[in-house]
């Protein structure tokens, strides 16, 4: 997935990043979603620098049929909370792994939300970006047998990979 310069608010998952420095993580999320045939788009919107644009984007996405938001940000990482404050749709927060605390500050900012404004928070960095896509797929899979089947295939592929690893160990 490459960065979307055109605003697309009609995708199933809207990935929002706080700055271009989060693009690598957004691409990992997007690539995983695309492997599951889930439409997505990526936008740079800051909770602090462009709060009005962020609010408009969330509203337009809701009107366009978006089902899940993924918010990726580092350092203060208020982005996921800002998105969650503007929607009742699921919001998944991915703490970025940059900065002097290597993402611990982002993790705490993302996970510590007030009662009634939840953000589902995944791991810091790359693993979290991929798992945010799988969590979005699980949410969407509630209503889509096709997505559920894709997720089951991912799990089966994981089992097969472990079996092959063990076969290699037995041969050596």
Image: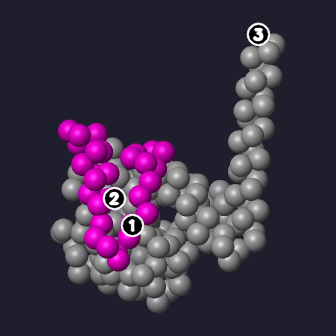
Q: Is residue 22 visible?
A: no
Mark 3 or mark 1: which is in front?
1
On the image, the x and y values in percent for residue 120 come to 43, 63
- Which residue is rendered at x = 61% and y = 64% of the image? 137
Q: Quadrant of the C terminus?
A: top right
- Judging depth in this view, the residue of 103 and 114 nearest the camera is 114
Q: Which residue is mark 2?
A: 111
Bounds of the magenta span? 99-128
Counting the numbered discs, the total is 3
Q: Which residue is mark 1?
A: 119
On the image, the x and y values in percent for residue 61 come to 44, 82
Q: Secondary structure at mark 1?
A: loop
Q: How is the image coloured?
A: one colour
Please say if 122 is above or below 114: above
Q: Earlier in the sequence, mark 3 or mark 2?
A: 2
- Residue 112 in magenta stretch: yes
């Amino acid at each position: 997935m490459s960065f979307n310069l055109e605003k697309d608010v009609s995708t199933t998952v809207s990935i929002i990043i706080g700055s271009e420095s989060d693009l690598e993580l957004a691409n990992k999320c997007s690539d995983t979603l695309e492997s599951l045939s889930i439409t997505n788009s990526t936008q740079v919107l800051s909770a602090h620098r462009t709060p009005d644009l962020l609010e408009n984007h969330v509203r337009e996405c809701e009107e366009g049929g978006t089902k899940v938001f993924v918010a990726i940000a580092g350092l203060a990482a208020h982005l996921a909370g800002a998105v969650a404050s503007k929607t009742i749709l699921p919001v998944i927060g991915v703490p970025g792994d940059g900065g002097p605390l290597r993402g611990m500050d982002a993790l705490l900012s993302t996970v510590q939300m007030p009662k009634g404004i939840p953000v589902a928070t995944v791991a810091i960095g790359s693993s979290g970006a991929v798992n945010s896509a799988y969590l979005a797929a699980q949410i969407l899979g509630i209503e889509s047998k096709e997505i559920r089947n894709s997720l089951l295939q991912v799990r089966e592929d994981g089992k097969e990979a472990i079996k092959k690893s063990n076969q290699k160990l037995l041969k050596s």
